[in-house]
Amino acid sequence: MTTYTNFTVETDADNIALVTWDMPGKSMNVFTEEVMDELNAIVEETSADTTLKGVVITSGKSTFSGGADLSMIKSMFTFYNEENAKDPAAAAQKLFDLVGQMTGLFRKLETSGKPWVSAINGTCMGGAFEMSLACHGRVVSSSKSVKIALPEVKVGIFPGAGGTQRISRLTDAQSALQMMTTGQSLTGARAKAMNLVHQVVEPDQLIIAAKQMIKDGLKSVAPWDEKGFKVPGGGIWTPASAQLWPAAPAILRRETAGNYPAALAILKCVYEGLQVPFDTGLKIEQRYFTQVLQSTEAFSMIRSLFISMQELGKGARRPAGIPKAELKHVGIVGAGFMGGAIAYVTAAAGIRVTLIDRDIEAATKGKSHSETLVKDSIGKGRLTQEEAAALLGNITPSAAYADLGDADLVIEAVFEDREVKKAVIEAVEAILPETAIFASNTSTLPITGLAKNSKRPDQFIGIHFFSPVEKMMLTEVITGKETGDRALAVALDFVAAIKKTPIVVNDTRGFYVNRCVFRYIHEAYDMLIEGVPAAMIENAAKMAGMPVGPLSLNDEVAIDLSQKILKASVADLGPAAVAPEHMKLINRMVDELDRRGRKNGKGFYDYPAKPAKKSLWPGLKEFYPQKQASEVDVTVLKQRLLVTIALEAARTMEEGIVTDPREADVGSILGFGFAPYTGGTLSYIDGMGVKAFVALCKKLATAYGDHFKPTALLKDMAAKGETFYGRFDPYGKKQAA
Ligand code: NAD
């Protein structure tokens, strides 16, 4: 047998070949050009070997594979754009051929004449599961870490290597659509119940069971290549399908508001594919995949949600030349709502935590948050008793700063009060080792100002978490004027250890995320004041692709917190910093009506006792004369909500607060769910073109106020035909550095 870089092939005494996929120097197997070439050679070699009874393919890593290397798909965009500029028709044909490569390879495996069994030992995603579907047998390990999914839709594409055709020929159409349009993960047991895999076995039985399928005479012919094959449920022209198909596009529209071309393409592939022979179905899938790949949505989503997120996670912004910090002991001061949760994520990363509050009772109460979360995880089978005990054992509540004598990093999460924070900084620094870093989790106080209380401001930084800390993937790392490179490196090493994605921003009021969030909420105040019915505002936001309406979000954040921030803006920047009508609205909600948001059960919504659902508070209608729905243009509402946020993001770039467009994009999606199909705030602008964006801003400024006026930077970029990724090229900068 030939030797391969990414695979080993061993044939046993029963003449069954075991192909083990184990890419050197990678933590996870992925499909690259080289992997595809090697797999192609293996298919040819094994099918030519007349003595061979069959092939089992598995992984040498703890996971099976993450699927296609999306950088490979990103390079298709570059290729297509270059070709398209020369000859659009030829470019489309070339893209179509390129897209067909993986489909063709898997079809070749499926029809090679040898029975193939995929032995799925760990998580198996996307293209890797599509390859497994082309195998004649699929055996899955029962280990709880195994997840199976076709998650492509989450990055703007869809299973385009035969997945839509094979899944819909193995399971009923409704389950197939649900799996692919949501990208949901399946356990082995669920995949078996859906008829997508043949067996679920103990991990140590995996290869034995896979080989046994071949010994038991597994056919080398896929069900759909057999004469008389019938689609599960009978196909499209059945009474059951007559229930499903007319509703399916409507349900999809309800879920996605028509913003995701890839999700709709899945419906089309299944609906059209099930009416034709299998190979024609593959061609239909290839056509739609080629079409989706040419969409702005696919391009922007892959760039932000995969490539950039990965790059930021791997420390794209980490200063070079500073050794990686191995954090052994982290101190957290302030064991309240945030401190308790930060302690949990730190302990879960295996780091020892000292959790300090004003007295031991308060500190112990802070730890109880972790106890609740751990109990919940045990109940859901996510943690064993031992893992839970180890996690909780990492957290020591305390009321003594002396316990921080050997801490590598201290994060303060005490009250949002300059004086309280000053006292804590001084007390902690009196104990802290010379080399340790001090971080503040403040949400509104500039880091440079807080650092004035520090004896070593170069070792002072902001690490801003989002609530709920255990769920939110983003952290903002804020550098003050004097913050040094080592503080930044340690902060980023910490964020990486707790498996969150960091964005690095310079010091400003509200940093990046909250500046954008408050623009969103303030635009909704404007709409309320104009008399737009609240329900229309909330629905327009959802239709624009936002996960939570602005009024609902304000309830979550707390309306009295908004009031505090508005008042602080007036105090610090003067009365012109806040629209008087906004102040009036919020004062009325908080001071007159005690409507503070979800936390006191009444805000823009009413929150009745469960199981009843929250509903918009009818009293809001009495505040302003209400417009009729017919007088309001929903398209304009959608534009206003997205444009006001994107403009704020552009301002942060112009001011040098955010310096890398990847961070603005990723931060906006992970921080507040900015319409993911756009790829984030700046990709939204680049996607429509800066010129078109500036024109839209001007139109909105005329009708709705100066806050929509395009900035000098945007006008300059529009005149020069630039994009954010061109002007602030994150890769160019790195190369230059
Ligand atoms: P919180 O009131 O729930 O907790 C603050 C804790 O600090 C309390 O347990 C209090 O006893 C303790 N504390 C106060 N003074 C102390 C001292 N001198 N020494 C030790 N402990 C002391 O507040 P929170 O919501 O957790 O906010 C904490 C910080 O995090 C604030 O700076 C806030 O702006 C920031 N933040 C909050 C959120 C949020 O969603 N709540 C989000 C990001 C950042």
Image (cartoon, rainbow, N blue to C red):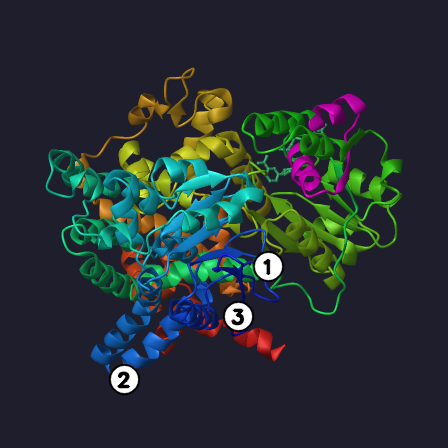
- Residue 402: give its label: none
- Which of the two discs, 2 and 1, labels the residue nearer the N terminus? 1
- For the residue marked with disc 3, what is the amino acid? Pro
Region in magenta: 339-367
Q: Which residue is mark 3?
A: 730
Disc 3 packing (10 Å; few <14; some 14–19; many ≥20): some
In this view, 728 is above or below 486: below
In this view, 187 is above or below 708: above
Determine whether the residue tagged by mark 3 lies in a helix, strand or loop.
helix
Q: Report x, y in % for residue 430.
A: 89, 44
Name the image quarter holding the C terminus. bottom right
User: Is label 3 within 8 A of ligand 1 (CB to nearest ligand atom)?
Assistant: no
Q: Does residue 657 appear in the picture of this structure?
A: no
- Which of the two discs, 3 and 1, labels the residue nearer the N terminus? 1
Q: Quadrant of residue 70?
A: bottom left
Q: Main secondary structure of the magenta part?
A: helix
Q: Which residue is mark 1?
A: 27
Residue at 73 percent across and 34 percent down: it is 390
Cα separation, mark 3 vs mark 1, equals 25 Å
Residue at 37 percent across and 56 percent down: it is 115
- Residue 86: give its label: 2
Residue at 32 percent across and 54 percent down: it is 163
- From the viewer's perspective, is the residue at label 3 or at label 1 nearer? 1
Examine the structure image and report whether residue 388 is included in the region drawn in magenta: no
- For the residue marked with disc 2, what is the amino acid? Lys
Horizontal side of 362 relative to 292 (left or right) equals right
Seen as rendered, the residue at the extreme bottom is 86
Horizontal side of 664 relative to 336 (left or right) equals left
Looking at the image, do the residues carrying marks 3 and 1 touch, with CB atoms under 8 Å apart? no
Figure disc tally: 3
